Image (cartoon, grey):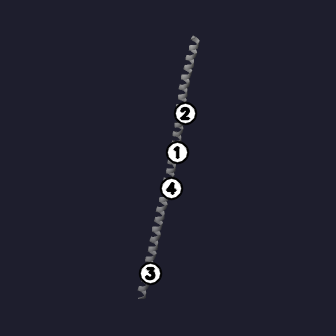
């Protein structure tokens, strides 16, 4: 009877040990999975930051080009106006010379 009791205790002890090892393995797998997920999220975050920087640069370039176009438009208007005024002045000058 005592042997059976010892055997039962040993089996119970072995079962607890196996359960503890299984809990440890599950914990390790869970930690590994979480670590991998965190690493993947960090990579995704870095990629998004790079995308944002690229978008900012494109917006900046577009703004500069728009500003240049606006300046060019204003310059063209001034050139057209001054060309017309110069033609008017020359026409007036010719009129005075004829008189």
Q: Which of 99 and 6 is in front in this view?
A: 99
The residue singled out by tag 3 in the image is: 10
- Element assignment for label 4: helix
- Residue 66 higher or lower than 14, as above or below: above
Q: Nearer the viewer, mark 3 or mark 4?
A: 4
Instruction: Give the farthest residue toward the front.
Output: 99
- Residue 43 higher or lower than 29, as above or below: above
The image position of residue 43, as x and y in percent, is 50, 54
Q: Nearer the viewer, mark 1 or mark 2?
A: 2
Neighbour tally class for label 3: few under 14, some 14-19, many 20 plus, Cα within 10 Å: few
Q: Which of 57 and 96 is in front in this view?
A: 96
The image position of residue 50, as x and y in percent, is 51, 48
Q: Residue at x 54, y 38 (%)?
A: 64
- N-term mark: 1 or 2: 1
Q: Nearer the viewer, residue 3 or 39?
A: 39
- Residue 29 higher or lower than 53, as above or below: below
* Residue 71: mark in rendering: 2
Question: Is the Cβ of the residue at disc 3 closer than 8 Å to that at disc 4?
Answer: no
- Element assignment for label 1: helix
The image position of residue 82, as x and y in percent, is 56, 24
Q: Which of marks 2 and 3 is in front?
A: 2
Q: How far apart are marks 3 and 4 (CA)?
A: 47 Å
The residue singled out by tag 1 in the image is: 56
- N-term mark: 2 or 3: 3
Q: Residue at x 50, y 47 (%)?
A: 51
The residue singled out by tag 4 in the image is: 42
Instruction: Give the farthest residue toward the top.
Output: 98
Q: Which of marks 3 and 1 is in front?
A: 1
Neighbour tally class for label 2: few under 14, some 14-19, many 20 plus, Cα within 10 Å: few
């Amino acid at each position: 009877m005592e042997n059976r009791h010892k055997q039962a205790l040993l089996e119970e002890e072995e079962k607890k040990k196996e359960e503890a090892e299984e809990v440890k393995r599950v914990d390790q797998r869970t930690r590994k999975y979480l670590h991998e997920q965190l690493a993947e999220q960090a990579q995704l975050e870095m990629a998004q930051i790079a995308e944002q920087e690229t978008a900012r640069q494109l917006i900046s370039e577009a703004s500069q080009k728009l500003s240049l176009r606006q300046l060019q438009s204003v310059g063209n208007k001034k050139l057209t106006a001054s060309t017309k005024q110069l033609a008017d002045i020359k026409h007036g000058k010719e009129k005075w010379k004829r008189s």
